[in-house]
Amino acid sequence: MDSEQFFARHSYDSMDVAAVWPTSASVAPFPIPEIEPISQPHEFQATPAAPEIPAAVGGLIAASYAALIAALAIATIGSAESIFVIVIAALFVVAFFTVPRIFFAVERDSGARASFDEFLRKGMNTFTGHNSGKAALVQMLIVPVLLTLLVLAMGITIAMVD
């Protein structure tokens, strides 16, 4: 619709809303439930972030990303620009693992976490449903491990070509 057509009142039909709105329609206010006042304020307690996952799994994930950064450093060791990029990437990895570490430090102690063997036996619930421990571990480690292998393959290819 052109702006000229919009401003030309004879080019479209206008309707009176009151003429088409049903007269029997009434809007009732939404009922507000009775809220009991809290007698004593509760102290803030963080909920457990990942109670099913043992600390060893976090260590494996951190080690796989450290291996990725090391593979990047080895594959691109020849130039000074690569050192700058590797340092920046390493700082991002440190930041990405520092925040969850802080979250785990402030959560309340909900008992002992599952051991690594118990995790592998019982598994855990993921977004795709219940998985065995090995399947859940593969879901967590597949990206950094495959990226590390890819970087190592690229480094080997570059070394063979030169």
Image (cartoon, rainbow, N blue to C red):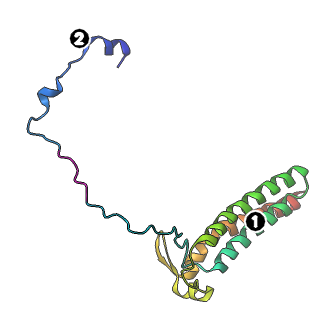
Horizontal side of 53 relative to 101 (left or right) equals: left
Where does the image place residue 15, in percent across and percent down from the top left?
18, 22
Q: Amino acid at mark 2?
A: His
Asked if residue 142 is among those painted magenta in the image, a careful observer would answer: no
Q: Mark 1 touching mark 2, by CB under 8 A?
A: no
Q: Which residue position holds label 2? A: 10
- Above or below for 110 versus 28: below
Q: Secondary structure under badge 1?
A: helix
Residue for point 42% across, 69% down: 40
Q: Which residue position holds label 1? A: 68
The part of the chain drawn in magenta is 28-33
Horizontal side of 28 relative to 39 (left or right) equals: left
Q: Secondary structure under badge 2?
A: helix
Q: Please tell me which of labels 1 and 2 falls first in the chain.
A: 2
The residue nearer to you, when weighing 123 against 145, is 123
Where does the image place residue 53, in percent across and percent down from the top left?
58, 78
Where does the image place residue 72, in percent across and percent down from the top left?
80, 61
Quadrant of the frame with the N terminus: top left
Q: Crowding at label 2, few (<14), some or many (≥20) Cα neighbours within 10 Å?
A: few
Asked if residue 32 is among those painted magenta in the image, a careful observer would answer: yes
Label drawn at residue 143: none
- Above or below for 59 versus 85: below
Residue 10 location, quadrant: top left
Quadrant of the frame with the C terminus: bottom right
